[in-house]
Image (cartoon, rainbow, N blue to C red):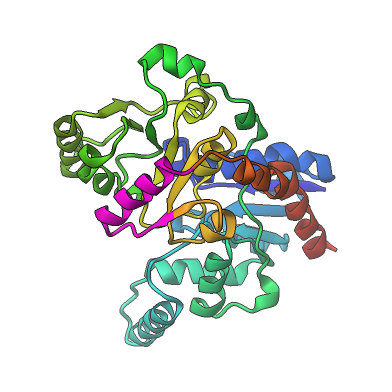
Amino acid sequence: MRVGYVSPMSIAAVNGGLRNQALQTTKHITSFGAEPYLISPWDDIKEMDLDLVHVFGASIENVGIVDQIKAMGLPLALSPVFFSNRNAAFIKRALKMEQLSSAFGSGIRSDFSVKTNLCRKADVILPNTSAEADLIRNGFSIPDDQIRVIPNGVEQKFADAKPDLFIETYGLKDFVLFAGQAGAERKNVIKLLEVANEVDAPLVIIGSFYRDQYGKKCIILANKAGNVTLIDTLDHDSELLASAYAASSVFVLPSQFETPGIAAMEAALAGSKIVITGRGGTKDYFDGYAEFINPDSSKSILNGIKEALNKASSDSLKNHLLEKYSWQRVAELTANQYKRISA
């Protein structure tokens, strides 16, 4: 089966979860009878003789290509990578209001409308969490038989990470770690930094800040705390990043939401205890194994970190992730959906 893969161009600049999900899927899907072709804007899809196309991201960047795929009559799988802190009822009302206003010629399309239209054109929608599936089903009014939850995966190599390199480089161990897009407001690092000086351990932030007001405020808070080490973004395949995971005692993701937070999965494999936002479907992956926090509350974040620091280390989360969330298993589940819609 010849499968074309489409991702938004923005992943070339942001080495985040969406890019990792797309790359790992195309890497492991070959074990299950699919031959991957990465589609770029310079390619003529008609010459690729594809059997199916998998699009990552229900974003406005992918509207044009999805329309072309449907015009060609190719089966379409869509990983929407979508979440909102607005509930399904709010989304449904917002779409209804937009529909009414368009009758009077407003021509305005919301992000919800774009995502809804893309989902309705897909033969199968592959959300990463049950919470994402619920929003799509009930907010966008998508039939249940069009939706199949396919989890995100984690690379097993992080289970073999060693702390030595990071300890030798920075002289730190048993610290609290954040790694990710620190400058993105959704990651909510500012709330973590607000309580940094109350954390009874060093705090390491791996991730670059933008030169905007948010980034400047974060750096001021970090410098004021006195126990914060700032490290620029490390490549995902960096040995130093894996070593940082292994050297840390607690990994924290205080984001407004995560679907589900691949960095937290990687850190857990390396042996770090997890503190993570309760929003966005994280409980599908971490329920019973992590400290969940309210991202709007610095106190909640601080209490979650304190609980994790005082908790004994255990391999239970590591074993849980290795069993259920390897990329090989994710690829197998994905390939099963390819077969279903192309039969």
Is residue 284 or residue 56 the one in the foreground? Answer: 284
Above or below — where is 156 with respect to 135? above
Q: Residue at x 64, y 46 (%)?
A: 321
Q: Residue at x 41, y 65 (%)?
A: 84
Q: Residue at x 53, y 79 (%)?
A: 138
Q: Residue at x 51, y 21 (%)?
A: 163
Q: Is residue 44 visible?
A: no
Q: Is residue 230 visible?
A: yes
Is residue 199 or residue 92 the one in the foreground? Answer: 199
| Image position, residue 83 (x, y; %) | 46, 62
| Image position, residue 160 (x, y; %) | 63, 26
Q: Which of the image's four quarters has the C terminus?
A: bottom right
Above or below — where is 251 with respect to 50? above
Residue 335 is left or right of residue 283, and the answer is: right
Residue 221 is left or right of residue 10, and the answer is: left
| Image position, residue 116 (x, y; %) | 50, 71
Q: Main secondary structure of the magenta part?
A: helix
Residue 270 is left or right of residue 330, and the answer is: left
Q: How many numbered marks are there?
A: 0
Q: Is residue 309 magenta?
A: yes
Above or below — where is 210 with respect to 95? above
Q: Is residue 239 magenta?
A: no
| Image position, residue 332 (x, y; %) | 78, 50
Residue 197 is left or right of residue 233, and the answer is: left
Range shown magenta = 292-311
Is residue 126 or residue 220 the one in the foreground? Answer: 220
